[in-house]
Image: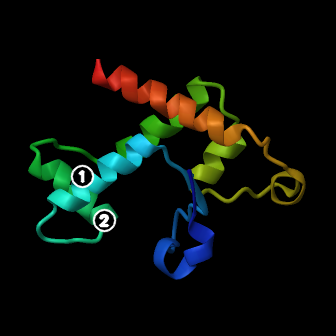
Amino acid sequence: MALEHFRFSSVFLRRTKKAYISFVSPEILKIANSISAASSYNKILSYNAVRLAIRKRGINCDMRFCRKIHASWLSYCGIQSEIINMLQGRTPRSVFSRHYLTLKLDCRDKVLQALDKLRRDIER
């Protein structure tokens, strides 16, 4: 349930907003696979493929707002700002964050629970 982008840096790491790790649930993977399977123009699931699939379904969506909602929701659910920054690819400048911060082992579960709650709220 953790995607380790840092292991495949040539594929996943961009010039800006370098997210080194992501948490995903089986439901998120199912949605991503359905977009990939429905995509006739590209069999590889990419940011652009997701954006075009959303547009093709008649939904006008600016992906920047998805990042904003994601961060705001995680904060609302009590997730530490350091974890949110890490998940969104922001590199901390403080000595504490770079060298001494150790994340709790349950942070993945808390993030996935928060995202599941957001998904259920959206589906209502």
* Picture quadrant of residue 68: top left
The residue indicated by pointer 2 is: 45
* Picture quadrant of residue 39: bottom left
Note whether residue 38 is visible: yes
Q: Is residue 90 left or right of residue 95?
A: left
Q: CA distance from mark 2 to mark 1?
A: 10 Å
Across and down, in percent, residue 5 comes to: 56, 67
Across and down, in percent, residue 108 comes to: 65, 42
Between residue 8 and residue 94, name the one nearer to us.
8
Q: Residue at x 73, y 37 (%)?
A: 106
Across and down, in percent, residue 58 comes to: 9, 43
Work out whether mark 2 precedes mark 1 in sequence or the reverse, and give the earlier one: 1
Categorize mark 2 by other alpha carbons within 10 Å: few (<14), some (14-19), many (20+): some
Which one is in front in this view, the residue at disc 2 or the one at disc 1?
1
Q: Is residue 122 left or right of residue 21?
A: left
Residue 34, which numbered label? 1
**Number of callouts:** 2
Against 21, residue 83 (above or below) is above
Between residue 15 and residue 38, name the one nearer to us.
38
Q: Is residue 33 left or right of residue 93?
A: left
Picture quarter with the C terminus: top left
Q: Helix or strand or loop: what does disc 2 sit on?
A: loop
- The residue type indicated by label 1 comes to Ser
- The residue type indicated by label 2 comes to Leu
Residue at the bottom extreme, as displayed? 10
Q: Does the CB distance between marks 2 and 1 fall below 8 Å?
A: no
Q: Residue at x 37, y 20 (%)?
A: 121
